[in-house]
Image: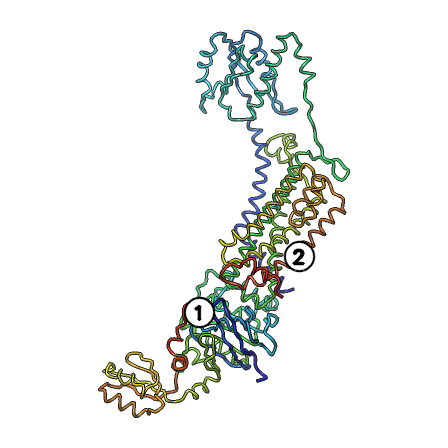
Amino acid sequence: MRKVLAVVRREIMSRVTTRAFLIGTFLGPVLMMGFWTLPILLSKRDTGPKRIAIVDASSGQLGVRLEAALGGARRGDGDDARAAYAITRIPAIDRAASVRDSLLPLTNGTSAAPAAYDGILVVTDSVLSTGNLSYLGTNVGSPTAMRELQRAATSAVQGERLEATGVSPAVVMQALAPVDLRTLKVSDGRLTAESGEASFLLAYVMSFVLYLALILYGVQIMSAVVEEKTSRIVEVLVSSMRPFELLMGKVIGVGMVGLLQIGIWAGTATLVGTNAGRIAQLMGASSSAAANLPIPTMSPALLTVFLAFFVLGFLFYSALYAAVGSMCNSTQETQQASTPVTLMIAGGLVTMFALLNEPNGALARTLSLVPPLAPFVTPVRYSLSPLPIGEVLLSVAAMVVGLMAVVWFAARIYRVGILSYGKKPTFGEVWRWVRAS
Amino acid sequence: MTDAVVRFDAVTKRFSGHTAVQQLSLTIPRGGIFGLLGPNGAGKSTSIRMLMSIILPDEGTVEVFGARASREIGDRIGFLPEERGLYKKMGVMEHLIFFGETKGLSRHDARTRSLAWLERLGLSDWAKRKVEDLSKGMQQKVQFIGTLLHEPELVVLDEPFSGLDPVNSQVMRDTVVDLARQGRTVLFSTHIMEQAERMCDRIAIIARGEKVVDGRLADVKREFGGQSIVVGFSSGAEHARRVLADRALVATVEDYGMSAELQLAASASPTALLQALLATGAELAKFEVVEPSLQSIFIAKVGVEAATAPAREVLHA
């Protein structure tokens, strides 16, 4: 046992002190912060109303109506609401093209003399029949801005069309007002503050973290095994301990480093999540802006399930990666040889996506019992809708059985592989290693 | 023979296509320095790896401490493999402590012993540096220390002196002699006969996987006979060649140009050889009847061609 601990300690110390670990561990949260705060900062920066010139060549009220619709549009909620557009309407019947062309140079501003207009809307009578409205602007590349503009213009054009047929636009608009679906998640029989969006995001983030960690640390274990093999350190080590002890020490050591890193990330995420409002205020944005961001929170029960499956999945896959490493003679060789293991992990991630729509279906229940996939399937199912404890335990049990089988299998390959040099073994040879006593 | 530390009994090991070790039987008694000698590719490392249970023999048995060799007795053996391996990114002291721990020492003991050894081998200043900052020779000494930290009864060194400069080589040699003096058993392999000649109590020469001769160094030399002669020329060596090639007088010869070591033919006497040499007109600087060197014993026993192994065998040395 002391020997296993020595290997565990070595694995941890030699990894935690590397620059890559420090950068990865602390840059991760910084990126995460950026991911969440950037939209807040952007929404704050982008507050000035867009100045739009309406070149009104229409004979009816369309131009006026557009002016009113756009002029009345607001951006932001509650106290923060500001006018979205500053509109200048220029009557231009029969000379739309020339007025438009004369305005074009005015959209070109410098830092000293800002542009007079951000865009030009050309309104003609044909808009009502064809539904085609021209907008010439510097901001046409922004899908959000264009969608907003289109929405405002659509309601104006619809109103004008209704008016023309003698129907009161106000009555129709009221009847057609869309329903806004507010989704709130129920968890453990209680209402959470989480929106459906956040719930999905959480499932997605968890699976992705698991996927990344399995591959990242699995490959680390694999190359460490190859390095020990090529440098022949392993010959000294197996004269001191059983290969199984070496394998366990390695997998546990690297696993603990992985847990530490994920723990730091998860801790940061929780801090950011619970203090989202305060952070938004620090940035100068309103706390309601932060509330609109889909920041998931993890319940302690979910965290437990996630960590349990993280550990089980980690042991499962890193044992496989170690076995693959022991069969290879160089890092280049491992890239090809590890493809089946990497595909299994990718399969887990893909399965997660497939189950999002029906987390409690028969397929999902079955896949929870398949060891290579369970680390992805079960926590995600749990995050979408809490599972009965019995079902979680059954999945854990299946995972433990699978894990023991894989470790037994991997240890037998590893035991022979680390001391075999030369040609890469064939499937037949590996099978003989497994069966040899 | 009850006090044998290591015993090879009719051990054979084959690799795809050729036999690396053939029916090897060897007994290494407790205490002293045992030299396993042979050219590159003779099967030395293969034998040692079987002794360490890194590979298993195809036929025959290897016994260590009276029981079949297994990895369970690793804590009583110190092993320096032919291809050295250390974790390059680790600190020297941390690495040594790790080696100690894997042999069952406590961290504290491992540290104390490592410090003493580093001091003794002149590496104290390097204890905190990373392994990769050390020269190859220093790394070799670090690994050598790692081999000895747990004070093993049996020390197995595969080519311990290769790649060392004369000064470091001497330091290592003194340490090895010291180990034997403490009552430990040292088994080391080398292809340099002069090294073994100065250190070993017992030797075994193997070539092409087969044992050629083994026993006490003194016995091996005595059995080989005293008819070994060193000749030195001051001039006219080229005239003497004809005599050296005369198989009626000379059985084998190692010709170094201005000197030669040779074995007399069974029927010849030193006097007859001396007269023949003088008759050629060569000026002799030296003519001495000596104990045969290991090198000459080796050449006489296995022939010059065996001293250089075929290429395919080197691959699996």
Give the tally of numbered discs: 2
Colour logic: rainbow
Q: Residue at x 39, y 85 (%)?
A: B292
Answer with the quarter of the image where residue B296 lies.
bottom left
Q: Amino acid at mark 2?
A: Ala
Chain hosting mark 1: B
* Tag 2 residue: A405
* Mark linked to residue B313: 1
Point out the image quarter for the N terminus of chain B. Answer: bottom right
Relative to B218, B60 lies left or right? right
- Secondary structure, mark 1, is helix
* Mark linked to residue A196: none
Judge if badges 2 and 1 mark residues of a common chain.
no
Placement of B160 over or under A378, stated as above or below? below
Q: Residue at x 63, y 66 (%)?
A: A437
Q: CA distance from mark 2 to mark 1?
A: 40 Å
Looking at the picture, how far across and down is residue B214, in whole percent? Answer: 48, 82
Answer with the quarter of the image where residue A327 lies.
bottom right
Mark 2 crowdedness (10 Å alpha carbons): few <14, some 14-19, many ≥20: few
Looking at the picture, how far across and down is residue B82, in whole percent? Answer: 48, 69
Q: Amino acid at mark 1?
A: Glu
Answer with the quarter of the image where residue A433 lies.
bottom right
Q: Nearer the viewer, residue A335 or A75?
A: A335
